[in-house]
Image: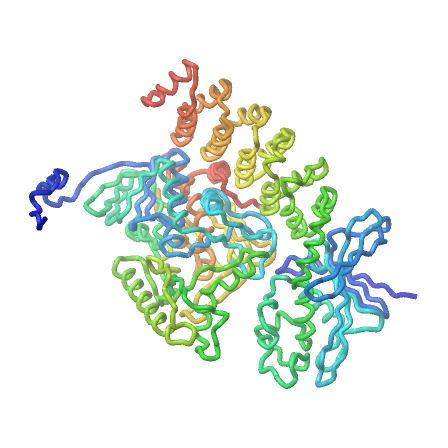
Amino acid sequence: MGAVSLGMVTPSFAKGESLVAPYKVKEESITTEILVVGGGTAGTIAAIQAGRAGAETILIESGSQLGGTTTTGGVAFPGIFHAWGKQIIGGIGWELVMDCVELNGDKLPNFSKVPDSHWKHQVTINVPLYTLLAEEKCLEAGVDIRYYESPTQIEFKKGKWIVESVGKGTKTTIVCNQIIDCTGNALIASMAGYDVLREKDTQPGSLIFRLGGYNYDSLDLTKIPEKYHRVLRQNMLENSKRESREHTYVPYSYVYVPGADSTTSEVHTKANNEGRNTLLKLVRTLKTFPGCENLKLVDLKTETAVRETYRIDGLYKMNKDDYTSGKVFDDAISHSFYPIDLHREGKSIYQEFLKPDVVACIPLRSLIPKQSRNFLVAGRCVSSDRLANSALRVQASCMGMGQAAAVAAVLASKQGVSPEQVDINEIKELLKKHGAIVPAQK
Amino acid sequence: MIKVRFFNVVIIGLLGMVLTSFLQEKESIKYWQVATIESSAADEPLIVETYKDTLTNETIFLHKTKDNLPLHYYKKVTGEVCIDQECRLLNIVVYWNITGRYLGFELPKGEFLSKYDHEPFSESEYQRLHQLLADSSMPLDVVSFEKLVEQPNKEQGTADAVSGATSKSVADMVVKGAAYTTYKLWNVINGPTMDLVSELTEKQLTPLLINRILQSPDNSDKLWALNRIVSATELTPDLETSLLEIVSSDDFYLAYSAIQAVEPVHLKATDLQEHLYSMYANVNHSIQKELLKKLGQAPELSLEVVNASRDLLNQLNGQQLDDLLKLYSKHGVNDLETCRSVVRILENENKYISKKAYDFLIGLQIDDATIMERLDAYKKGKH
């Protein structure tokens, strides 16, 4: 048979098209007890905790998935949860990590052994699984997740926060009792008019990727400039060879992105552009080296992960000595364990390790901006000096802060007060009830 | 008269490793760290067994007590270390614990180690060597000796003569001036023989021996033993007691590994289930979760555990409740008493918690009008 005209054979299911109403932004006003802004490392945990503590909770996330640096940024080996043989950060963050490890059939590092490199106690996780589990736990806790949204205005009126949030086709007014700013950039704190601080020069961000198509052991490194050795070596998961004795590999490579900032769409786009451009140049260069002719880029994370932007000016500003001495504050609500770890101009890392048996503590006051009402932060924007912040910013610490901030916010919401007015012992008790490890006075 | 000196325990900060006394005789030098099984006067080694290391064709010796308890392995290491074209024989005995962990070294009477400048090792250099040999995490097995040294003099080959130029990046991994000696000994101790002796012990494992290893002061020994408890291992009362002690310790990874060591077949014993459950109240949340997951592997859940856990239901946070209800679901726990306890949770003002109770109950076939009424009320928001 010859050609048959389309109209003659079009099935009935293809005849359903109709004109739709013109694009219109949906505007609505909703209320909640707790609003968490930012579904990253700290915000995800904060939202789950608030929901589990029985509070109505909304979580706004500007991207499409939870986890932030851990997932979207690809730094998929959270830590550090253990120090000197003991668990020092537990709770929801650890639960999420363990669920991930178990579901993926992974092994835990040997936390009993003090490692020769601190990162050997970080736990490698499967990113897609983490993303799924984080979302599942939020939804189970009754959290209303709002992806693709960003707050644009915020106002405190009659004991409530009124937040305008704009997303794809939505403009929502959220009225809430308490806000937890988990943007990592102190964005909401700044929007609310609280002081935020920033260093003149900030640490570089990292765009994370993975290479394939070459065998590091077969390379003649004398024919490859030394500055490229690290990227080739690290990518080949060198340490995984020792997996029978230690679970130790760092499963990534990265290019530095100087001055990377994720505060606005504009600067975050710039950070992504720069990182991707640097990586493309690197791939092209690497392919010119003997043994790397078939080198392939096999994975690239969605966005440049950012180390440092803004910090709040809190009721207490943690300093480096507080951190390295393991000072236990009366209002300490979580531990933190990492070396002072300042990436400098993408060329070197200033590191200072904690002495044996020292574990740092985070006071609740460092999560509360000065002059604020009904407001907390959690994550890397914690009030701290630059060196303390370079250790506080890591994922397990952020998870601990997220859980603590949520407990403080829920109690404050129930009592109709500001978080700093809640009895610290009540906060500690509720944290312990939810599995968090609260620093004890020595 | 033999002069014996005992030195205080040295704590190596970063490694958390304990180096025990070293014993230096006038004519023999011996460095020893904490042993997996300390030999006492009552069980001084009386039996020596020999094994052939098929990779090196060398002989490995095993010291055992008169009760056939393996104490440690050792091997005589000989070879040339060349210094400025002059070579002298390396003659040393190296020891492993029965788990494969480095134990120590001993030089025959009159022997000593020397550096590239012909200087004999000082006491601190022996200590340093002892410390380095104990660090199995150093990457000396994946680095060639040539890479260990800066500007190696190829004409001199693998000689300690070049170790005078020990590069800064590897200075932490070798005794200064004795790079080759360090490199060679480290690779003997941490190479295939380490795995071989571990395998030799593995073939001799009994519940008694596992239990003895679990008493070791060294955590890596404990983990070695925990990782070798298999379905066929009989959990004798002593072994079970040791396991439970580790579960209740504050070392997370040891406690976690002790729970992992229990196999489903061991959980046929309801006593063990009950003992594990009795730990629940006194361990941290992470370990609590692992305990319940482990009980989930039992062929059948002990009624005692069900009865005891029922009393906890109203005290748990939402996630703990979820873990316990999952355990019930896994074992088909649906007795009326349990269901009545769970139904009370529907009244909890925390929606996350009450929903866990609802989800559990709604999945059961319950022939009880009151419970069904409460479930209905919950669904309609009347709770």
Q: Quadrant of residue B282?
A: top right
Q: Residue at x 20, y 44 (%)?
A: A171
Q: Quadrant of residue A354?
A: bottom right
Q: Is residue A232 left or right of residue B9?
A: left
- In depth, the one of A183 and B140 nearer the eye is B140
* Residue A327 percent location from the top left of the image: 54, 52
- In depth, the one of A417 and B347 nearer the eye is B347
Residue A370 seen in render: no
* Residue B155 percent location from the top left of the image: 63, 86
Q: Is residue B36 left or right of residue A433?
A: right
Q: Coloring scheme of the render?
A: rainbow
* Residue B153 percent location from the top left of the image: 62, 84
Residue B246 seen in render: yes
Q: Residue furthest right?
A: B1
Q: Residue at x 47, y 65 (%)?
A: A234
> How many numbered badges does the structure rendering display?
0
Q: Residue furthest top?
A: B369
**Does A366 appear above or below B233?**
below
* Residue B42 percent location from the top left of the image: 86, 48
